[in-house]
Image (cartoon, helix red, strand yellow):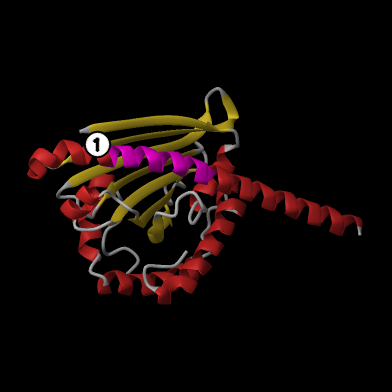
Amino acid sequence: MESIDKKCTPLKREYDECFNKWYSEKFLDGKDTPSCTLVFQTYQKCLRQALKDQGLTKMIDDARPAIGSVFTDNDNQ
Amino acid sequence: MRLFEAAHVFKHDWETVSLANWRKYPNEQTPHVRHVEILNQDVDPATGVLRTERLIMVRQNVPLLVRKIFGGDTSYVLEYSEVDPQKRTLVMQSQNMTYSNLLSVGEYITYTPDPENPKHTLFTQSAQLKASGALCRFANKIEDICWNRFQDNAHIGKLGLEQVVTKILAERQALMMSMTQTASG
């Protein structure tokens, strides 16, 4: 599956792979120490720029209260 | 306003089904889900709960009336979820962002061990669809169309998850076989 910005696709896929492995082999076994932090940060840097370029940032922030999200715009910056 | 409620038992353990949730897209049954991005994800150090925020982009054919009123066929949805590995619960809440001034679609989903059989997983889904008064005489018709489409998508969504679970089980089987062969070789 492509990212909303093609540039971010390989980074997204790398993170998805890392996350799925961590989730099934560590997290579900009670070992929740993150092991995909660097990969996540690289993916996020690209994604944040894409969200900004596509004008989606405000829309996302406005929708957070409706779904009880704990995150804010400043997370992962 | 339209309300939607459904429940389904997946005959697989909660761990496998919750993993399938993360690996759900893309799948053949739900081509309308075009992009899924992780916006935020962390483990709450106080509770061990995995918290995730996702952006989902959906595009699918819609009746002409909907296309004319909404001005498009693409929408963005925001989803927040929490996975508690101790309690074995996955809870998800989502809301459409696009066209939210015309139609509000809020969905709440849970995956928990089936109380009748803890080796199986109970899936519950509830949703509320409400058209804005600004749609005037079209409000009811729009709600009807979107509610029907929501039902269709809910059905293929379940089929899609089952397919992903099957894939995960097949991978595990293949891995076990290759480990057996390696051990005996």
Q: Residue at x 31, y 36 (%)?
A: B127
Q: Which residue is drawn at 33% across and 42% down?
A: B149
Q: Which residue is drawn at 27% across and 64% down?
A: A74
| Badge 1 amino acid | Asp
Taking the image as shown, residue B164 lies to the left or right of residue B110, namely right
Mark 1 lies on a secondary structure that is helix
Taking the image as shown, residue B24 lies to the left or right of residue A53, namely right
Taking the image as shown, residue B74 lies to the left or right of residue B14, namely left
Residue farthest toward the front in the current orientation of the protein: B64
Give the percent coordinates (x, y) of residue A61.
23, 58
Q: Residue at x 39, y 40 (%)?
A: B152
Q: What residue would you read off at disc 1?
A: B144
Residue farthest toward the right in the current orientation of the protein: B185
Give the percent coordinates (x, y) of residue B46.
42, 47
Q: Give the range drawn in magenta.
A: B146-161
The answer to which image quadrant residue B38 occupies is bottom left
